[in-house]
Image (cartoon, rainbow, N blue to C red):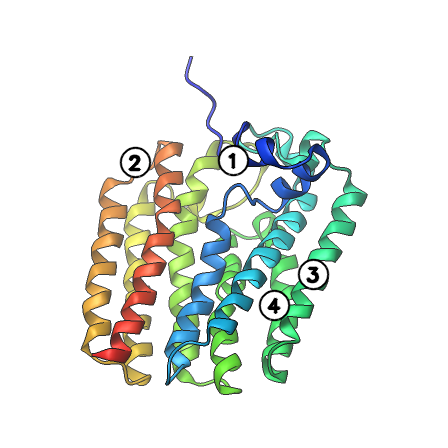
Amino acid sequence: MPKPHTDILSGDWIDRFLPVRFRPFARLMRLDRPIGSWLLLLPCWWSLALASEEGISLWFMFLFVVGAVVMRGAGCAINDMWDRELDKTVERTKTRPIASGALALQSALIFTAFLLLIGFIILLQFNTLTIWLGVSSLILVVLYPLAKRVTWFPQFVLGLAFNWGALLGWAAVRGELALPAFLLYVAGIFWTLAYDTIYAHQDTSGDRLFGVKSLALRLGDKSQLWIAGFFDLCFLSLILAGWFAGLHVGFYVGLCVAFLHALWQLLSWHQKEPSSSLEKFRSNRDFGLIILAAILMGKIF
């Protein structure tokens, strides 16, 4: 009998090194699965690199790392509180701390407030515009779990939330917003539509059973074609962002490498195999790092 598909592992570093009482909180934050933090962080770093004229501030990079981890953790906690009854019925998610009963709902609420407080303290290290932009992103964080109950496009809402850093990074450096930042934001949204539609194919059977909506269900067998289109629009937006930001030829060379990575994702993805969807989803950390390298190269040559 095949092993049930899950991305939640036991016996990892959390079980080996953390005291028992801390483990549910670490798993609530998905500290054992950092890909979400990477996907939240990378648009911030893209924007920092694009906006910076004399090298990226390492302090800003560090602040965004901490911010991405705690805000991703808060977002996961909010999502799990919304989905606690649904998660109990899905093989991949039934061992999540709230669904399994390892963490009480009240404890999760208090911990989420604590994470949001840390996020706010980090925001206070930036200028006024960045602070207000950061606070406004909470609306999207709260709305995402609701979106998959009322629309076929929750990946779009996730894209709006996860790529907010493309605006934050530019605002942190320049103290204002400009066209390249908005184009970078649009590129990130299309990127999220691509990778999260791939991710959502892990759960299509359960989602269909419980009435949860997603682009994976809406697009069905046409998903691969649509994902290719999402990647194309992502690249178009990136090209325009680089053009208006005055990047040099190195940026476009880097984008060619990123294009090959996206092509590999599409051609090697087996839509009906959950493990393949998870693998390709996780590979988008590398895609995002390639884009970051491309922006940095575009600043040099």
Amino acid residing under circle 2: His
Q: Earlier in the sequence, mark 2 or mark 1?
A: 1
Labelled pair 4, 3 in contact (Cβ < 8 Å): no
| Horizontal arrangement in the rendering, residue 254 relative to residue 285 (left or right) | left
- Residue matched to label 4: 137
Question: Between marks 4 and 3, how big is the CA–CA gap?
Answer: 12 Å
Q: What is the number of the mark on residue 208?
A: 1
Q: Nearer the viewer, mark 4 or mark 2?
A: 4
Which tag, 4 or 1, sits closer to the chain's start? 4
Residue drawn 70% across and 37% down? Answer: 98
Q: Which of marks 3 and 2 is in front?
A: 3
Q: How crowded is mark 2: few (under 14 residues within 10 Å), some or many (20 or more)?
A: some
Q: Is residue 57 left or right of residue 112?
A: left
Residue under numbered circle 2: 270
* Structural distance between the alpha carbons of marks 2 and 1: 19 Å
At a point 60% along the width and 35% down the height, the residue shown is: 17
Q: Crowding at label 3, few (<14), some or many (≥20) Cα neighbours within 10 Å?
A: many
- Tell me how far mark 3 sits from mark 1, CA to CA: 33 Å
